[in-house]
Amino acid sequence: MNVSIIHAGDHVSPERWGAALPCNPQEKEPYMGHYETTGKEIFAFLGALQKTSPEVGKGFMGLHKAATTGGALGTKHKELIAVALSVTAHCEGCLSVHMKSALDAGASREEIMDAIGVAILMGGGPALYAAKLAHDVLNEYTG
């Protein structure tokens, strides 16, 4: 599926999902983990959405770009907030996208784990399970 019509800004462009994937030592093909695949699937769906419901797709991507760029907080801090909110929302797809965006924006493992800790505080017991999921996503992206 062609996702090239998504125009959300470089930090959320679908092209970055295929760049510099780590290789499995036993295979010559790049390795793409579960969460990386989930992120690609989300962008593919957005591409399809923009074809069938262009105003909805354009509106969502416009909101995403407006919320994650510019303003008093930098992109890294906004993506750290998005990671924490993804934990409290128990949203695997959100974690897939925003974990990658936080890392791409320069967030360290330590900063991400701090944000996950705040999410556990704010989300209580149910957020603890989602925090474990966030930790799995982080590990897939950073090893």
Image (cartoon, rainbow, N blue to C red):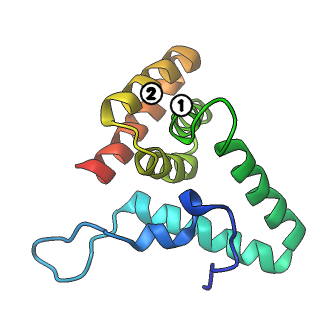
The image shows residue 58 at horizontal and vertical percentages of 81, 65
In the structure shown, which secondary structural element does the residue marked by tag 2 occupy?
A: helix
Q: Label 1 crowding class (10 Å Cα cut-off): few <14, some 14-19, many 20+?
A: many
In the structure shown, which secondary structural element does the residue marked by tag 1 occupy?
A: helix
Camera-nearest residue between 37 and 106: 106
What amino acid type should be assigned to the residue bearing mark 1? Ala
Q: Quadrant of residue 52?
A: bottom right
Q: Quadrant of residue 21?
A: bottom left
Image height check: is 134 above or below 65?
above
The image shows residue 54 at horizontal and vertical percentages of 85, 73
Q: Earlier in the sequence, mark 1 or mark 2?
A: 1
Q: Which mark is residue 84?
A: 1
Q: In which quarter of the image is residue 72?
A: top right
Residue corresponding to mark 2: 116
Q: Label 2 crowding class (10 Å Cα cut-off): few <14, some 14-19, many 20+?
A: many
What amino acid type should be assigned to the residue bearing mark 2? Ile
The image shows residue 139 at horizontal and vertical percentages of 29, 45
The image shows residue 90 at horizontal and vertical percentages of 57, 37
Residue located at (57% from left, 31% from top): 81
Camera-nearest residue between 35 and 98: 98
